[in-house]
Every structure is written in C-alpha cells, then in structure tokens.
C-alpha cells in the first residue's frame, strides 16, 4: 500500500473535530481508477480559527446592499453522483434556475431593470461569426436527424409496399388462372352441347359485355409494339422532339419503313402541303 | 489608494498580534471593516457608512505561466472576457521567486486580487486565486475544462453585464468553504458601477460543491419579455437557461495565509497530485510483467521440488 505524503507538515494547531467530517472516502473523479489508499492523510492542516480570521479581514461590510453582491444561496438536493453526467448537469441547471427566479423576484421588488430590451445592441461575449458557426452546426444536426427519420420511414414503407405488391401479384395470377380455367370449361361445355348457335347466327362469346376490365387495363398499361417496328420490343419509345428530328433529317431504318403500304401510311398526309398561302384564299381549306 | 492598503496591512498585523497574545479567550476583538474600525456599538458603524458609502473597487489581474496549453490559454481568455474588472498581463516566468514577482506585478498594476494560471508539464493546470496585500491565497487543480468556443455551448450574453452568483448552501458548512465563497464573490462578481459593466443581468454563474470539488457553470438567462423590469405572469415558467461556458472544476489543494505563500491554513486531505496518479498507473502496468516473471520462477521451483513420477506409458507409441 502506498501512503500519501504530505508536502509541508508545518505544525500548527490541528483541529481534529473539524477534520472528522472530511474523512469520507472520496472517489477521484479525475481518473476514475483505484486510489492508493482510501484513508486520507490524517495530518492535513486545518486551521479554522485563522481561516475565519482571514475571512473577517477580506469580507465586505455586512450591511451593504444585496445589489452589490448579487449572491443567491440555493439548497442542494440530495447527494449528487459526480460520475453521472446527466444528473450532475441537471443539478447545476436546477440550482441556476431556482437562483435566477429568486433574483428576478428581488429585482422586481426593487424595481430595477434586469432584462435586456430587444433593441439593445451591444458587444456580446461571443462574436457574431462564432454564433453563425453554432447555428450551422445546430442546423446540420437537425438535418441529420431528419434524414435518419426519413430513411427509416422509407424502409418501413418499402417493407409494407413489398407485401402489398406481393399480394397484388398473387391476386393477378389467381385471376388469370381462373379465367383460363373458365374458358376451358366453357369450351368443354360447348363441345358437350355440340356448338349450339345463338341468335343472329353468331357464336356466342361470353366476353363482349365489357366485363373484361382486366384485359383492357393490361392493354392500356402496356401499349403493344407497333406492327411496323422491327426492334423486337426493345425500343422504349422516343420523345416527340426526337421523332420530329428523325423525320426531318433522315434516319435510315425508320424512314425506309415509311415506304410500306400499310394502313398507317395510306392515311398519312404529313408530306402533302396543307396551307399553301400562295393560292386562292377564297377557296376553302380542309 | 496605496495608503489605504498600507493602513489595512498594518491594522491586520496589529489585529493578528493582538489576537495571538490574547490566546483563545479573547472573544471581543474590534472588528475591521473596509472603512475603519467598528466597535460593538451600532452608532459608530452607521456613521462610518454614512461618511463613505461602500464602493466595490475590485480589480483582478489575470496572468499565466509560460508553456501553457492552448486549451488553458483559451480558458484564461474566456475569463478575461467574462470579468470586465480584470486586467490581462503577459506571461510570467515560472521557477523560483514566483511569489515575489507576482506580488510585485499585482502591486504595479494596482490590482486587488489575482487569478494566476500555472500550467505544469503542458498537462496540469493549477489556478491560484489570490487577494492582494496580505490576503489569503488558494491553489486549485483545474479539471474538466470546456471553453466558450465549443460549439455545443450555444448561449451568448452581453459582454460585461453583471452576473448573478449562485452558491450551493454547502458553502456555509465549513470555514474554508466560507472563505472560498467570499473570495469567489469578490473576484467573480462585477463591481456595481464599473466603467465597462453593462446594465442588464442576463447571465448567472453557478458555483456548487459536489464531491469536495467546486464546479463552475455559466448560463444565459432567456425569458420572453417585453419590458425590462417586469415579467408576465407565465414568463417565469418559460424561463430557460442556455449554457454559455466556460466550464471547469476546481479541486482545492491548499489555502495560504499570505498572497502566494505564507502559513498554510488548510490542506485538502484527499488531494493526490496528478504526478502521483500517473506514477501509480505506471507502477501498476510495470508490476504486471514482474508478477509474471515471479510466477514463472515459482512454478519452476515447485516443479523441481516435486518431481513427476515417470509415466509408464510414455514410450508406448514410440517407434524404433
């Protein structure tokens, strides 16, 4: 065991009664590691008489105004654990808050101004540029938190969306299967009944009443490939500007197709000049 | 003002001498005030006060030693900006005759107290809080330093406004805490009609004793208000405190009777110097290897003393 050495042991009066209450083992909050010995040095000097004498020497006269000193005493709550940062800071904060309340009420009674008016501009203890830095940091932290929240929400939504999507797909498959089954059944039924003819001599089909929304919806969402398209379904479609330029400046493949005699090209009058301004204006234009 | 100081010193010496002669059985001693002697009668006191109203003429000299760390230098500069009644001086050479140099310096700058930041080994900061001529002096070890430049301390207040000082009641428990409280009040409190002081009170200093250390905090008071001397009914509840900084924790080491020296009045029994702590840590680490070596030799001796019985089946699988 290593004993603590006292630097100068000048023999003054040692008041043991005063030093007794100090002898609680203290936890060194500086390093947080084992102290060499838990007993404090017993021969620490404590000269309370001289201390009080010195206090009298330096003290200000007792009857001066409170406004000269501005001190407030605050009763501390129970034992504060030094190592628990949050509790300690909270204790300091409450001490400050209570003291300020007391002080403010005193000021109000004295009728003295104590709060800074909004238009009082003076030098502050931290410069404006420093406060800007602080503001930036605060905004940055806020943004970080918000982004984290958003990301979490996205993740949740994705999970849910995935589930919903899976459900939808399953439902669609089921419907498809059902419909195919129903067609097969209908065909079998027709076979069995020997292909009965309905009115007007047409075969009766079950799907002309417009109950086939699924088919229509699918057609609408995925427009089929144009008959003249030789790309094999890989072209996604071009913007109008692109198409205009293609048609104007020539673009081998597509233009060649235009020479075909299909339904589209028969009704295509783009090449013919519509509004010839040089002609007779009295004639009607279509 | 110099004459006043000399008079104080002389009177203090007189008083001390008188007290010593009279031993402990001298309860009635003419009490000293800043303005003169006060006897037990109240009349004299009132007269004295009426003649010279109390005026706080405190001036604090703030200096540091050479080879001070950047963090501690910023702490010192922060304190200079917090105390408008302070005067900053250039670095002081440490080593011998420190006390004499500093006392002379305080006298030269006509200050009544001093905050001296002594940095040792660029790691440990000691703060001397001294009341000049003949006043007591305290040496602290400073821990847990956070300066005002830290971005987490977001508050701000007027430079030079007078602070409210909040002490926890355990400052009244023992004489040495009482002395420290008085010294804090005088040094950290801005004098009332000081030239550089600003009129409003928008920050509060908090001194509290936790675990035999003095913790210092500085908060800005923010209250939604419209008038300067009244708060609305709900205003007090909406008051918030924002920390401005700096923050530090003081561990009192010794209190001396004179300035920068003199008879030791108080020693902290729990104080362990940082050097000792570091030395102990090193010893602990060194002892690991030593104990290992010792354990090895012990094992060897043990084995030699209790020889093993030769195993029957040792050569069972040995091939020839």
Image (cartoon, grey):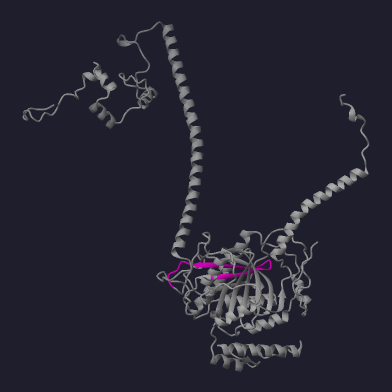
Residue at (55% x, 86% y) in the render: B54
**Quadrant in which the C terminus of chain A appears:** top left
Residue toward you, A249 or B118: B118
User: What x and y, as percent, mark residue A123?
Assistant: 44, 70
Q: How many marks?
A: 0
User: Could you tell me what secondary structure mostly forms the magenta stretch?
Assistant: strand
Q: Viewed as shown, does residue A124 lie left or right of A266?
A: right
Q: Is residue A280 above or below residue B228?
A: above
Residue at the outermost top position: A194
Q: Quadrant of residue B259?
A: bottom right
Residue at (93% x, 43% y) in the render: B306
Magenta residue span: B204-227
Residue B136 appears in the figure: yes
Q: Is residue B289 magenta?
A: no
Q: Is residue B215 magenta?
A: yes
User: What x and y, as percent, mark residue A233?
Assistant: 37, 22
Residue toward you, B128 or B221: B128
Q: Is residue A156 above or below residue B223?
A: above
Residue A70 appears in the figure: no
């Amino acid at each position: 065991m290593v004993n603590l050495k006292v630097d100068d042991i000048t023999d003054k009066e040692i008041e043991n009664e005063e030093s007794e209450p100090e002898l609680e083992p203290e936890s060194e909050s500086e390093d947080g590691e084992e102290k060499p010995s838990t007993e404090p040095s017993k021969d620490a000097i404590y000269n309370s008489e001289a201390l009080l004498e010195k206090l009298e020497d330096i003290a200000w006269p007792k009857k001066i105004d409170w406004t000269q000193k501005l001190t407030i005493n605050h009763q501390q709550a129970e034992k504060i654990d030094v190592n628990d940062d949050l509790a300690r800071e909270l204790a300091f904060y409450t001490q400050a808050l209570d003291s300020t309340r007391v002080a403010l009420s005193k000021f109000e009674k004295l009728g003295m101004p104590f709060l800074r008016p909004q238009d009082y501009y003076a030098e502050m203890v931290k410069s404006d540029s420093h406060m800007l830095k602080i503001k930036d940091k605060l905004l940055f932290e806020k943004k970080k938190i918000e982004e984290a929240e958003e990301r979490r929400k996205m993740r949740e939504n994705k999970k849910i969306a995935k589930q919903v999507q899976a459900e939808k797909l399953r439902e669609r498959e089921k419907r498809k299967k059902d419909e195919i089954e129903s067609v097969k059944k209908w065909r079998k039924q027709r076979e069995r009944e020997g292909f009965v003819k309905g009115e007007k001599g047409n075969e009766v089909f079950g799907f002309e009443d417009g109950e086939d929304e699924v088919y229509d919806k699918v057609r609408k969402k995925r427009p089929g490939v144009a008959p003249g398209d030789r790309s094999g379904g890989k072209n996604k479609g071009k913007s109008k500007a692109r198409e205009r330029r293609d048609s104007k400046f020539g673009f081998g493949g597509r233009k060649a197709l235009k020479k075909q005699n299909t339904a589209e090209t028969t009704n295509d009058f783009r090449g013919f000049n519509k509004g010839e301004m040089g002609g007779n204006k009295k004639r009607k234009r279509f | 003002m110099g004459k006043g100081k000399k008079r104080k010193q002389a009177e203090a010496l007189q008083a001390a001498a008188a007290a010593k002669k009279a031993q402990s059985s001298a309860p009635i001693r003419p009490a000293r005030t800043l303005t003169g002697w006060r006897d037990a009668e109240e009349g004299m006191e009132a007269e004295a006060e009426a003649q010279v109203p109390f005026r706080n003429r405190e001036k604090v000299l703030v200096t540091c030693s050479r080879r001070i760390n950047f963090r501690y230098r910023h702490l010192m500069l922060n304190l200079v900006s917090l105390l408008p009644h302070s005067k900053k001086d250039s670095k002081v050479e440490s080593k011998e005759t420190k006390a004499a140099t500093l006392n002379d310096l305080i006298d030269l700058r006509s200050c009544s107290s001093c905050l001296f930041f002594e940095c040792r080994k660029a790691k440990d900061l000691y703060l001397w809080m001294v009341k000049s001529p003949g006043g007591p002096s305290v040496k602290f070890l400073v821990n847990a330093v956070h300066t005002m430049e830290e971005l987490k301390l977001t508050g701000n207040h007027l430079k030079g406004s007078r602070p409210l000082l909040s002490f926890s009641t355990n400052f009244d428990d023992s004489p040495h805490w009482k002395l420290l409280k008085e010294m804090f009040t005088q040094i950290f409190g801005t004098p009332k009609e000081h030239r550089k002081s600003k009129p409003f009170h928008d920050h509060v200093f908090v001194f509290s004793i936790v675990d035999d250390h003095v913790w210092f905090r500085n908060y800005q008071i923010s209250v939604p208000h419209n008038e300067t001397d009244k708060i609305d009914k709900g205003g007090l509840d909406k008051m918030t405190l924002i920390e401005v900084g700096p923050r530090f924790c003081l561990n009192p080491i010794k209190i001396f009777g004179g300035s920068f020296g003199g008879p030791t009045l108080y020693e902290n029994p729990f104080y362990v110097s940082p050097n000792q702590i570091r030395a102990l840590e090193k010893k602990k680490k060194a002892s690991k290897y030593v104990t290992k070596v010792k354990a090895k030799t012990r094992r060897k001796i043990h084995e030699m003393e209790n020889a093993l019985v030769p195993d029957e089946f040792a050569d069972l699988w040995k091939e020839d």
